[in-house]
Image (cartoon, rainbow, N blue to C red):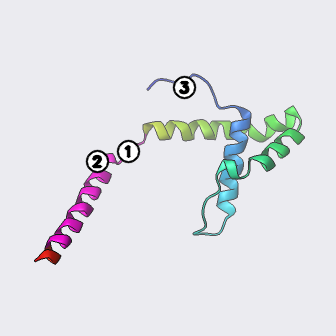
Amino acid sequence: MAASSRTPSRWNTCVWREVKQMNQERPPGSLFLKASHCMKELAAHWNSMSKDEQEKETVDAIKDLEDHHESKQLALHNVPLNALQDIQKSLELLDREVQLLF
């Protein structure tokens, strides 16, 4: 696997970590927040911090985000399984329609 050309930025790392934390605090069964839903608040918080604070806040999370990106690249995708399930569902629907005709 080719190595990534660059590491995630501190800003991207902060957004990823904060959104992940907010979603973990949400009640079970509720919809997940997306970064775009809370970007203004995150940007205001980020801009209020000094460069040292930004670095301290993201130093550990950068490695976690890199690991997350790597695991997504290495993960097996279940496309054939999804296709099989789609075909099975379509055949079941067709079978029902044929049975209704006769």
User: Which residue is painted at 54% across and 37% down in the image?
Assistant: 69
The C terminus lies in quadrant: bottom left
Say few, some or many: other residues with alpha carbon within 10 Å of mark 3 (under 14 / 14 to 19 / 20 or more).
Answer: few
In terms of image quadrants, where is residue 74? top left
Instruction: Point out residue 78 in the picture as x, y percentages from the top left corner.
Output: 35, 48
Above or below, 70 relative to 91: above
What secondary structure do most residues of the magenta stretch adopt? helix
Q: CA distance from mark 1 to mark 3?
A: 20 Å
From what the image shows, is residue 83 above or below residue 3? below
Quarter where residue 94 is shown = bottom left
84 displayed left or right of 49: left
Taking the image as shown, residue 8 lies to the left or right of residue 74, namely right
Three-letter amino acid code of the residue under disc 2: Pro
- Residue identified by numbered label 2: 80
Contact, CB < 8 Å: mark 1 with mark 3? no
Lower sequence index among marks 1 and 3? 3
SS at badge 1: loop
Q: Is residue 26 magenta?
A: no
For label 3, the SS is loop
**Upstream in the sequence, badge 3 or badge 2?**
3
Q: Disc 3 to disc 2, how far (Cα)? A: 27 Å
Q: Which residue is mark 3?
A: 4
Find residue 38 and report its horizontal and vertical position in percent.
73, 51
> Residue 77 — which label?
1
- Spot occupied by residue 67 in the image (x, y as percentages of width and height): 56, 38
Quadrant holding the N terminus = top left
Magenta highlight range: 75-98
Residue closest to the eye, 16 or 68: 16
